[in-house]
Amino acid sequence: MTSTTTRNLQRLALAVGVVLLAGCATPQPTRGSPGQRLDPFEKWNRKVFAFNEEIDAAVLKPVATAYTNVVPQPARRGVTNFFGNFGDAWSAVNNLLQGKFQASVEDMTRVGTNTVFGLFGLLDVASEMGIDHKYEDFGQTLGHYGVGAGAYLVLPLFGPSTVRDAAALPLDRSVSPNLFIGDGLTQAGVTTLQVTNARANLLGASRIVDDISLDKYTFVRDAYLQRRRSLVYDGYVPEAVIAADKAAADPDGAAAAAEAAPPLAATPAPAAAPAPAPAAESTPPPRPAAKRSRSSRAAERARARSTQGARGRAQAAPHAGAAAPTPARPASGPRPAAAASAAR
């Protein structure tokens, strides 16, 4: 027990040390994909990746292929369920650390159900009952509390990782049946079975990657980073994070767009419009001036005719009064007979 406790303390100290160094390993933005931005050690990582590929082609893949050919599918599924039961227990702890109490209870229910009714986890009874597992590890827990992924790393034998996930790896790997095994040889056998079974489950996926990828290193790197980011945010990556990744992936293009955006988006204010020139200083167009001249002349002719008509009427008025004098009454003379009768 003392040696086991010492090893666990060493792993915890290593994890804490790597987490503290995560902030120092943030790469400078470079043009390319988000994976390229997080891969400042690409030259070294490619060498480790090539080393892992050689080990896989020489040892792991042949052993996994032989394991698949010898061990029937139900037995391989049972081995996967057995190790997955320990993973569910560790997921329950991480869900609890993240405050996801319902998911933690569901994972604990899975562990209890599969342990009791599934022959210590060999049968996945919980999935048949509709209780799905909520996979979480300590790297996701660190990401949940704002610890950045840090630089992309390719670890010897372990494959793709980041600074944050590498810091969490000792704790994540320690949760296995080896916690209850004291014999070193048995622990090595259990670890070998776990690695071989995991590689056998990936034989189909590795063949697809080999067929479709032009650059396998880039494909694996970008796929790993996208998957880990999706797991940290439970599949709902905020738009701000996506926009930040796109901007950081192409900083020159983002800066050019930011410089060009204000002139395109700005609308000139009414006050900034040029003031119209004064009317006195402006020269009227020739055609409207001609129109005003003709209308002026027509108005003058109308006024002249009106003036002449008024003068003519004034001059004709005295002659009309003299030609029609009021008849004068005769002063004396004999009256007509009718007038005389009326007078009487």
Image (tube, rainbow, N blue to C red):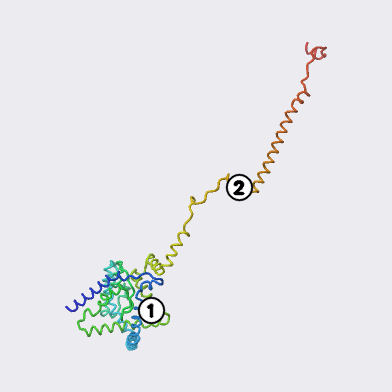
| Residue at x-position 49% and y-position 51% | 272
Determine whether 155 is above or below 101 in the image: below
Q: How crowded is mark 1: few (under 14 residues within 10 Å), some or many (20 or more)?
A: some
Q: In the displayed structure, does residue 12 sit left or right of residue 57?
A: left
For label 2, the SS is loop
> Can see residue 213?
no
For label 1, the SS is helix
Q: In which quarter of the image is residue 318?
A: top right
Q: Where is residue 323 in the image (x, y as percent from the top left)?
A: 78, 24
Q: Residue 12 carries which label?
A: none
Q: Position of residue 246 (x, y in %)?
A: 40, 68
Q: How crowded is mark 2: few (under 14 residues within 10 Å), some or many (20 or more)?
A: few
> Can see residue 33?
yes
Q: In the displayed structure, does residue 22 sit left or right of residue 7?
A: right
Q: Give the CA distance from mark 2 to mark 1.
A: 75 Å
| Residue at x-position 65% and y-position 46% | 289
The amino acid type, in three-letter code, at marker 1 is Tyr
Q: In which quarter of the image is the N terminus?
A: bottom left
Front-lying residue, 187 or 276:
276
| Residue at x-position 72% and y-position 28% | 314
Front-lying residue, 274 or 261:
274
Q: In which quarter of the image is the C terminus?
A: top right
Residue of label 2: 283
Q: Residue 217 carries which label?
A: 1
Q: Which residue lies furthest to the front in this view?
A: 281
Q: Position of residue 101 (x, y in %)?
A: 28, 67
Q: Nearer the viewer, mark 2 or mark 1?
A: 2
Determine whether 55 is above or below 101 in the image: below
